[in-house]
Amino acid sequence: MKGITIYKGKATYIDRADIDTDQIMPKQFLKRIEKTGFGQYVFYEWRYLKDGSPNMEFELNKYPNSTILITGPNFGCGSSREHAVWGLKEYGFRVVISPSFADIFYFNAVENMLLPCTVTHDNVKLLIQKVKEKGEYYLTVDLPNQLIYDDENIKISFIIDQESKDRLIKGWDSIDLVLRFEDKISEYEKNRPSFFPTTQNFQYTK
Amino acid sequence: MGRTIIEKIWDNHIIYEFDGWHGLYVDLHFIHEVTSPQAFEGLELANRKVRRPDLTVATVDHNVPTTPNHSPITDPIAEKQIKSLYKNTEKWGILFFDINSPYQGIVHVIGPELGITQPGMVIVCGDSHTSTHGALGAMAFGIGTSEVELVLSTQTIKLKKPKTMEVRFEGKLSKGVYSKDVILALIGKIGVGGANGYAVEYTGNFITDLSIEGRLTICNMSIEAGARVGIISPDEKTFEYLEGKPFAPKGKEWEKALSYWETLKSDPQAKYNKVVTMNVSNLEPMVTWGTNPSQVQPITGRIPYLHEIEDEFLRNSAKKALNYMGLEEGIKITDIPINVVFIGSCTNARIEDLREAAKVIKGKKVHPKVRAMVVPGSTQVKLQAEKEGLDKIFKDSGFEWRESGCSMCLGMNPDVLAPGQRCASTSNRNFENRQGKGGRTHLVSPAMAAAAAIAGKFIDVREIL
């Protein structure tokens, strides 16, 4: 996959805490056996009204074609569904900025080249205020230097762990990384306790 | 300095290290129909193989119908997912407890029940409630689909070492209060992100006294506080529970396993990065009022007023939650009427849960305005309950008695709430639209759900026990 270094995009926000992956990708859309086709369903219940028309109160519709999402803390909590990240990516998001992320979501994001930027509470509030003021608000995210800045005078730093940063810059898949350790895996397997269960001898009776 | 059980299992499984990441060997990988198809697809596109089909177990739970004999499957897409699991397990030689198997069930119910979940193991599954298996002293956690693919092809998982948190529960529950109430109270106290980045070990005399099934409920909801791992050091109860189970070691191997398991418990001098203590003696039955599990109150309590919530983001969330739930701030929990009762899920659909609910409902009738259903956590639980006559108690009182599956916990099968319906549910998540579009979920214990079924509203189960 292609890596990320410096990225500029239009920002939108959802100013709530604890946005769970059931909201990001509602369960009725999980029934696919492909990784594609999820973008249209992102935040489905919030994006659309009962009659199927767009809910113009919702920030993704207020600020269309945004590619940077700013949110309250603990973004992506709940279900492990990676479909949430596939959907956000396909919708167009490249960066999510939040005071904190749920662990599984964070891993899923990095795995799919969606950049999770951790910034302070106050900076999230500041950026949301800016989107509200400007309407069309563009941010540049500089991953190597861990900086987020706008076209005026805002410049804030963000946190990301070193390994995720390297992988996002290089665009590596984690299986490629792990398969380098094939020998070590085989070696470990020789010494596993004999009493750990396997399905080998299980008599399956219907 | 001593080590915690988390550190012991971690250290025993490290295969590789780079940049602060550890590759851990995975002893057991559960797969199901919803989060595995894309992983198998990715594997095949890259010409990779399933490394250890013998350490992989499949079942169908998320989208299966719970009508008699799990049929008919009316949703063509659900059918496609189930078919692709048949195809993938057959192709790679993976043991599959399919829709007709007596061992079919919710993946987190069947693991312990089959005894394939054992102390000291690293267990993963593409489902966040995998933390459940920690109740038997395994380090178990949910993973995303890319990670499912990684585990299929390498039998390892790449992780940052979590910080450790000890949650020490002391005291003794009063009658009518259960492990579900304890874990809800904890989440209410520390918040849904309160354990992000931590692996949690539950300790204290309450845990020591608690049954294995009660412990499974506690560990199950660790993720609702943000912890991927929730674990309990194995003890005599754990060993007794496992002995004789289909996958438990036998004879000499049992002896070997036992002496290994006994080394796993956290050392008395072990240090945790954080310690939370809670006395459970004065706990009341808990009921969630909002759209995440931390929005919870005791049955004698009331919904908070918005002005009482200081944090702006949390206040915004609470405001939206009340709007979604169709509830007013400040009202009493006992003034909330309900029209659906769901007893099921990997949190609370094991045999002890059904027994507790049956005790409450026995000889009484479900309120005429309430639809109530029991969905056993596994086919084995269902058979056991039928042996004990619990099915009859439920059916006589007006409950539907169903086949096992995830069912209305997440509404991926036909068991869903209609818009505006309000449900007393023994599941784990009260997120918006989870049980059905526009459906409103209140999380409770099985006994409280049964009491609500009778009354048509939330009542204090302690008053009728």
Image (tube, coloured by chain):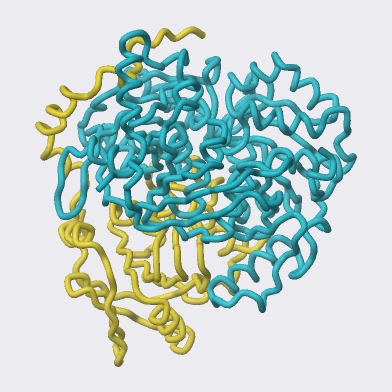
Above or below — where is A162 with respect to B269? below
- Residue at 65 percent of width and 21 percent of height: B382
Which of the 4 quarters of the picture holds residue B417?
top right
Q: Which percent across, then down, holds residue A89?
A: 36, 58
The cyan chain is B
- Residue at 28 percent of width and 70 percent of height: A159
Q: Which percent across, then down, holds residue B401?
A: 73, 26
Pick the front one: B435 or B344: B344
Above or below — where is B10 with respect to B364? below
Pick the front one: B352 or B267: B267
Q: Which percent across, then down, holds residue B295?
A: 62, 60
- Residue at 62 percent of width and 52 percent of height: B430
Residue at the extreme bottom of the image, as rendered? A153
Counting labels gives 0
Pick the front one: B155 or B98: B155
- Residue at 80 percent of width and 48 percent of height: B460
Which of the 4 quarters of the picture holds residue A95?
bottom left
Above or below — where is B132 with respect to A72? above
Decide if residue A180 is on the left or right side of residue B234: left
Q: Which percent across, then down, holds residue B240?
A: 48, 20
The yellow chain is A
Residue B37 in view (yes/no): no
Pick the front one: B407 or B265: B265
Which of the 4 quarters of the picture holds residue B250?
top left
Decide if residue B282 is on the left or right side of residue A86: right
Residue A202 in view (yes/no): yes
